[in-house]
Image: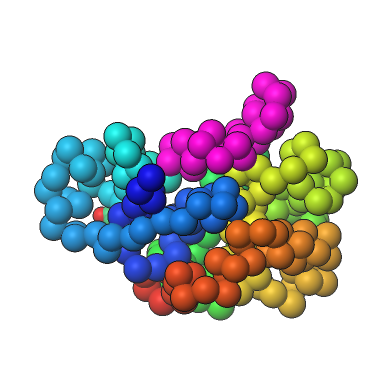
Amino acid sequence: MSKPVIHYFPIRGRAEVLRLAIVAGGDDFDTVDVNYAEQKGDREKYPFGQCPRLVDGDIDLVQSNSIARYLARKYKLEGKTEKEMCAVDMIMEGVESLRVKYVNLIYNDQLAEAAKETYWKTYFDKETTTGRNGGAHIQYLANYLVKNGGAFCVGDSLTIADLCLWEILDLHLRIFGDQIRETYPELVSYHSAISELPGIKDYLASPKRLPEPNANKLG
Ligand SMILES: N[C@@H](CCC(=O)N[C@@H](CS)C(=O)NCC(=O)O)C(=O)O
């Protein structure tokens, strides 16, 4: 069987959760660097003019969260019962809300010090969970984890929700490492434990893990 092929830029970006799902599923992937002109010009391959795109046999898909859900079904990371699947989906959307804010911090605010300060206050400070935040607050996500015992977000095994949470945490630890270690030790322990799981540990240490999280080299 041929490997799933991820078409993307040579950065972690929105493809990182997809890579994690494949390796956590015990599989491997190939990559193709996106040709920007093709991405913008070919509506068959890139219906929204954006990547990532995944090609896996006769599956040819864009929109990272649609791809993530496909991979979750393929590698049994979608939750075991209807109730678990619903919870997995909910957490993915919660992570997406935070990702939108993160992308804004990186690309619009260029990770400026003042913007970082406001960002922490709005989306990470434990005192601001009742504030206006567009549904984005790390505490909301931590709540699920703590309620479920701390090892996984949902059920008793890894799901795509964990990979989404792990990855958004990984990105934020690079920027707010000390503050997160001080304020959310349960998230740091969780991040460390997931990093050790089969497939994930080897991937993280391999040259396949790209060094750059974002295209503008910030973060
Ligand atoms: N909703 C899309 C967003 C994808 C997205 O923002 N892709 C970026 C790269 S991370 C891109 O293709 N940017 C180039 C452009 O929009 O022209 C998804 O989740 O796949």
Give x and y (percent) for residue 112.
50, 76
Q: Is residue 10 above or below residue 52?
A: below
Q: Is residue 61 above or below residue 178?
A: above
> Residue 93 location, x and y as percent?
57, 39
- The quadrant holding residue 78 is top right
Of residue 131 and residue 68, the one placed in the foreground of this image is: 68
Viewer-side residue, 28 vs 88: 28
Farthest residue, direction front: 1
Is residue 94 among the parts visible in the rendering? Answer: no
Q: Answer with left or right where residue 102 lies relative to residue 52.
A: right
Q: Position of residue 172 (x, y in %)?
A: 62, 66
Q: Is residue 5 left or right of residue 209?
A: left
Secondary structure mainly formed by the magenta segment = helix
- Split into 4 quadrants, where in the image is the N terminus? top left
Q: Residue at x 47, y 36 (%)?
A: 70
Q: Is residue 46 left or right of residue 145?
A: left
| Residue 131 location (% of width, % of height) | 70, 47
Tell me if residue 88 is in the magenta stretch: yes
